[in-house]
Image (cartoon, rainbow, N blue to C red):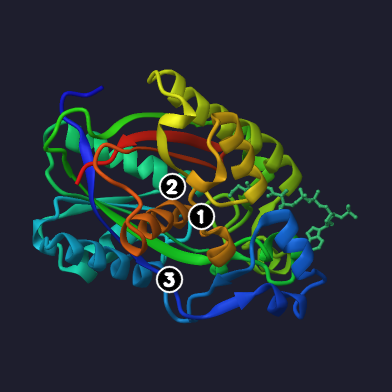
Amino acid sequence: MPDRTAYIRSVGRFVPETRLTNQDLEKMVETSDEWILSRTGIRERRILDPGLGNSYMAVRAARECLERAGVGAEEVDAIIVGTVTPDMFFPSTACLVQKGLGATRAWGFDLSAGCSGFVFSLTTGAQMIEAGRYQKVLVIGSDVMSSIIDYQDRNTCVLFGDGAGAVLLEPCPEPGHGILDFIQHVSGAGGEFLHMKAGGSLRPASHETIQNRWHYAYQEGRQVFKFAVTEMANVSVQILERNGLKGEDIALFIPHQANLRIIDAAASRMGIDMSRVVINIDRYANTTAGTIPLCLYDVTVEDRRLKKGDYVVMAAFGAGFTWGSILLRWWE
Ligand code: UT7
């Protein structure tokens, strides 16, 4: 455990108003509410209005987060945005958020790790605090998945939604609390199963790439499921074991929300019953880097389910493949 740890001082979120329900999707592709709900746990998802980009959501989530802490934007040292759907390639979403907030002293960058984007960003921000150089780091998970989803492809369009969550990290005033440990992995061999084929330097946008619908997310769901169900559970169990903890010691498990069956498998391997697992997939679907901070908002702002000293485990799995877990002890 590091001498100096980072803790989550406050949380903010933004979810668009517009709802896309399973019933709406039944009219768009050959699917059914029954299939979507039983295979994934999703009932509806939120969709950002056309003409708005990722930074619109990220700024609003960050603003609420700072307001809750009573911290001015000019006090922020750094901004990390976990995302795969930036407003544009460059400048980074972090730069747009810095401008939108008026965070005059902050520097920042985007971090691309698919659905592990928030977990990787949180540990990166925590290490910047642990190193002693920074006092206030904003970490945001924000994705506009509707901008890269093919609403003619039933394999993917039922799964994703839009949303953003933000947390403010500061040095933890009390030893033994805050972000205590993390485990992270990538395996590029998994890239073929979940990716966006065109729009990057390998295949810049052309008539051909658009005709082939290569600017949309492509997923071989069954393949991704096989890895996700095993690896998210492994990494969640490992972080417990190496810290001498058992499932019963954990107040809340906050997993990435890709599929209720994947979450179920991880929780049962950890020995955590579902009453201590935070779920929002039914309301928001898979918001990629947004899932975990949106869940955190529910259990800290909507309901106050965490108290000082509670252990929390977060875990995610996503494109790359990328996966990881975090152990933290709540301090407030
Ligand atoms: O967050 C990033 C990481 N992503 C994940 O973790 C996602 C992991 N994968 C999954 O969650 C699941 O694989 C899915 C939810 C994507 C799919 O569930 P599944 O139980 O693995 O279904 P499947 O892909 O094996 O498809 C079963 C059947 C197929 O029909 P046949 O071949 O059995 O006749 C599909 O064509 O379901 C069909 N199907 C659908 N039917 C109705 C696929 N999508 C749909 C749909 N509605 N939307």
Can residue 306 be seen in the rendering of this structure?
yes
Q: Amino acid at mark 2?
A: Gly
Badges 2 and 1: C-beta atoms under 8 Å apart? yes
Q: Which residue is tagged 3? A: 15
Question: Looking at the picture, how far across and down is residue 125, in whole percent?
Answer: 26, 42
Image quarter of residue 105: bottom left
Residue 255 visible from this viewpoint: no
Question: Residue farthest to the right?
Answer: 30
Q: Is residue 142 left or right of residue 274?
A: left
**Secondary structure of residue under mark 2:** helix
How busy is the neighbourhood of tag 2: few (under 14 within 10 Å), some, or many (20 plus)?
Answer: many
Residue 64 coordinates in the image, percent (x, y) = 25, 67
**Mark earlier in primary sequence (2, 1):** 2
Q: Is residue 129 above or below residue 31?
A: above
Image x and y of residue 261, in percent: 67, 46
Circle 2 is placed at which residue position?
A: 117
Give yes or no for contact between labels 2 and 3 (Cβ–Cβ under 8 Å).
Answer: no
Disc on res. 288:
1
| The residue carrying mark 1 has its beta carbon less than 8 Å from ligand 1 | yes
Crowding at label 1, few (<14), some or many (≥20) Cα neighbours within 10 Å?
many
Please, what is the three-letter code of the amino acid marked with disc 1? Answer: Thr
Amino acid marked by disc 3: Val
How far, Cα to Cα, is label 2 from label 1? 8 Å
Secondary structure of residue under mark 3: loop
Which of disc 1 and disc 3 is earlier in sequence? 3
- Residue 312 position within the rendered picture, expressed as x and y whole percent measured from the top left: 38, 39
Q: Is residue 258 above or below residue 5?
A: below
